[in-house]
Amino acid sequence: PRLVRGLDYYTRTVFEFVAPSLGAQDTICGGGRYDDLVEELGGPSTPAAGFSIGIERLLIALNENRAEIPCVMTPFIYIATLGEANQTKGYQIAALFRSQGIRTWLNLSEKSLSSQLKIADKKGIKWVIIVGDREVTENRFVLRDMQTGNQEKIDWADLKQFIKRFKSTVCSI
């Protein structure tokens, strides 16, 4: 059996993923090995493999098959650490969020809070956790809603409960 992809430079492995619902142009993804191509173009013998994906076809097929599209890859939480001494606490918070599948951006620079809030806003991140000297001393952190500007203080002891609260809203960005 042989698969013809309209190109004669493939060697050995060739593949296609198709969605019959797309009709005549049903290939979503295709590729294979082309071990002799570089040499045929005048270069040294170079084994190679590659593929291409038709993004528009993929989206049409997903829509037609009512596939659930995952939420965007924008980080959901930005952790603003104020000062190098507070980065360890930032790591701990980030690890907890990430272990629960919540995308988290952890700042490790010495930028001011204002600069960090601008970064979070520019990236479209909805929530910022502020970790500074006062927050560490008081065993709490400040949560800022970037859309409303509202802030609330949350005790470290309540962090796991806080994460559960947010897990249900991760895809509602």
Image (tube, rainbow, N blue to C red):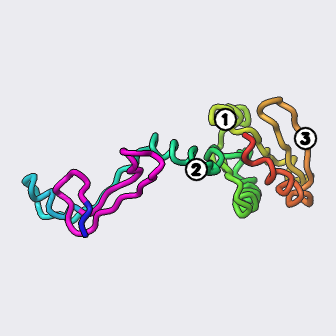
Residue 55 is tagged as: none
| Amino acid at dot 3 | Glu
Residue, disc 2:
65
Of badges 1 and 3, the one in the foreground is 1
**Residue 81 at x, y percent in the picture:** 73, 47
**Residue 88 at x, y percent in the picture:** 73, 59
Residue, disc 3:
152
Q: Quadrant of residue 15?
A: bottom left
Quadrant containing the C terminus in the rendered view: top right
User: Element type at marker 2?
Assistant: loop
| Amino acid at dot 1 | Gly
Q: Residue at x 10, y 56 (%)?
A: 43
- Is 103 on the left-hand or right-hand side of 44? right
| Span colored in magenta | 4-33
Residue, disc 1:
124
Give the camera-side residue of 86 and 32: 32
Badge 3 crowding class, 10 Å Cα cut-off, few under 14, some 14 to 19, many 20 or more, is: few
Q: Is residue 10 magenta?
A: yes
**Residue 84 at x, y percent in the picture:** 69, 51
Q: Is residue 91 above or below residue 125?
A: below
- Is 44 on the left-hand or right-hand side of 147? left
User: Whole-Å distance between the Cαs marked 2 and 3?
Assistant: 42 Å
